[in-house]
Image (spheres, rainbow, N blue to C red):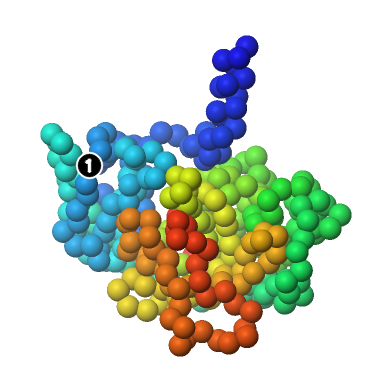
Amino acid sequence: MKRVIAAVVLLCLLPLSALAAKAPDKLPQEITLPAGKFHLFDQGFTGAWESSDPAVAGAEPDVYEKKYVRIIGFAPGEATLTLTGKSKTATVKVTVLPDDTAEDPAPESIQSAIAIALSEWEALGEQKLPKDLKGNKYNKWWGYAVGWCGAFAGYCLDQAGIPLEPEDSAPRLKPLGTGEPHSIRAAGVPRLDTAFTNMDRVTKIPRPGYLVIYGSVKDTYGYKHVGLVTDVIPLEDGIYQVSTVEGNMSSTVRRYCYLYDSRSVDHKNLAPIPEEQQEAASGIVYTPHGDTWYVTEFCMTWY
């Protein structure tokens, strides 16, 4: 009986995505990816990765399972990735295709979701919300008292009329074949990852209206928190200025603005906005969440 209880506890501690997703494919010799997209592989052995052109493609080892790696396409072109272990080597030729939708504006319903999120922030100010359903309308919308970052994002999308899949459908979802606005009614961050991964809607490149998922190297967990991207300014060399609205930050709704390095593969992709570029008394937090936090991925609510 003790073994059974221990096994159940262990399952509860695992990310939901780890329980729902199939095992990663074995490392290929060649792969073709659109810019911004990535694929998870079981590399078979541990070692150090190098890219012949880090601006085109890179390899990001998983913080949770060291033998898993994300092969990421950053910009159109070709690059060879090399994994060097103690006694083995492996190479992957990566071809990255252009993203033909990169310049498309956000659909009206996505713009509406952003406006709703911003109005929620303005209405709440610094007011702290409890987790209970009576005092927290986001958890009331969700139906349970939970850590409500995912409930906040889902509430804003739902209020904007964006179609939401049922939460329990996440492990069974398939690519939609269209970039129309779409999401899932889920509050758990791992479940959001499962849904958007199965719909082939995860990327390293931000856009307004996308969900941003954060991880932490401190607890080796890639699905710690989620927010809604409200604005994106592309800079140089794969750097973006990203603005967000996020629920359940110190029990309130907050706005953030930070620098994000889409080409980083060492889980250190966040940096503060230079002080001279910050707007005084704006209520926006210009410092990322913490030294151990990083952006895991962006969930593509549209493309």
Residue 275 screen position, x and y as percent: 46, 83
Residue 10 screen position, x and y as percent: 55, 28
Residue 279 screen position, x and y as percent: 55, 86
Point 22% across, 46% down: residue: 48
Q: Which of the 4 quarters of the picture holds residue 160?
A: bottom right
Point 75% across, 64% down: residue: 128
Total label count? 1
Point 58% across, 21% down: residue: 6
Horizontal side of residue 169 vs 101, given as left or right = right
Residue 57 screen position, x and y as percent: 26, 59
Query: Could you say which is closer to the camera, residue 106 or residue 16?
Result: 16
Q: Is residue 179 above or below residue 6?
A: below
Residue located beneath label 1 in the image: 47
- Quadrant for the N terminus, please: top right
From where the camera sits, is residue 103 visible? no
Q: Secondary structure at mark 1?
A: loop
Horizontal side of residue 118 vs 34, given as left or right = right
